[in-house]
Image (cartoon, rainbow, N blue to C red):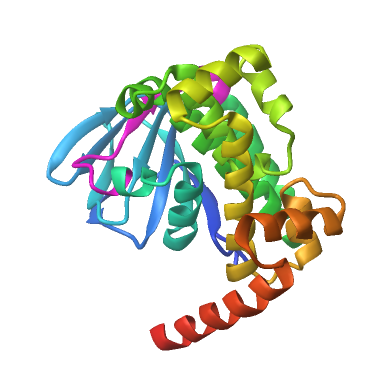
Amino acid sequence: MVVYTKPSYANDLFFHISYQAYPFLHSHDYWEFMVVLKGTIIHKINGKVEELPQNSLCLIRPQDVHSLHHKKKQLSQHLNLGVDAKYFEEYMRLIYPTLYEDIFKGEMPMVIGLSHAKVNRLYNDANKILSADKDEYELQMKLLFMDIVREFYSETIKSAAQRNSYSAVVTQLIMLMNNPENMKRDLVELIEETNYSYSHINRLFSREVGVTPSRFFRDKKFEYAKTMIADTDMSLIDVALAIGYENYPHFSTAFKKYTGVAPMDFDRNQRNYYQSNKKEQQ
């Protein structure tokens, strides 16, 4: 029994909650996060077999060929969040520049375990979308997606720290800075989430990364602003607000200092470049 599936107005994100096994090998052109809500799923993927117990979270890539089976005919339940391939790639690159490639080139999709309380919360949040109207659907789906991504990659902070030779707390702060939803926030707020003092983080971050967290976050904000100007229809005022500038003249001055051109000139030049490239690809 499928409880919920993709509505006609869904764009980049959609989900469904299902009790059904899907014993047929298949692949799809989108990325998929699968949360095992009840029971155990026998997951056959890329020629291998793995058991996904209750409270597992698995990421399935577009190139993966897989099928889902009940264990000994026991009922299982799973929530699947589908993510448009382009949307997923752009979001992963905002989190960390090489994260998309790291995920895509792996031999097997990644699986982590969640707490029972966390799974219940994801399930309840997903069910709230059942009553969301068209205007609220996209916002609620983005929040659900961000919550799953945050949980998924918070489990990999230690391994990411080892890979990047950064300490866990510096890696945590970088992940917070790379989250698009945090671009409008003040650096002090993000540092408070690490439970370390500003002065301690400033010294540690500067030593490990080579620049101050303030400089690093500023660069991230303006790179994000450049992306929004070039690739979206957002107004320049909305772009300014998205990275924490409530005063457009201040944003314009800071943007010109960073890029060498005013936002309006960058807007004109980049949109023309983006639109001409888009026509060539069609």
Residue 152 pos. (x, y %): 45, 31
Q: Is residue 5 visible?
A: no
Count of marks, rendered view = 0
Residue placed most toward the observer, 155 or 259? 259
Quadrant placement of the C terminus? bottom left
Q: Is residue 152 visible?
A: yes
116 in the magenta segment: yes
Q: Residue at x 47, y 26 (%)?
A: 171
Residue 261 pos. (x, y %): 66, 67
The image quadrant of residue 75 is top left
Residue 273 pos. (x, y %): 52, 80
Q: Residue at x 21, y 44 (%)?
A: 45
Q: Is residue 207 above or below residue 254?
A: above
Q: Is residue 222 above or below residue 173?
A: below
Residue interval drawn in magenta = 103-118
The image quadrant of residue 164 is top left
Q: Residue at x 25, y 56 (%)?
A: 63
Residue 158 pos. (x, y %): 38, 19
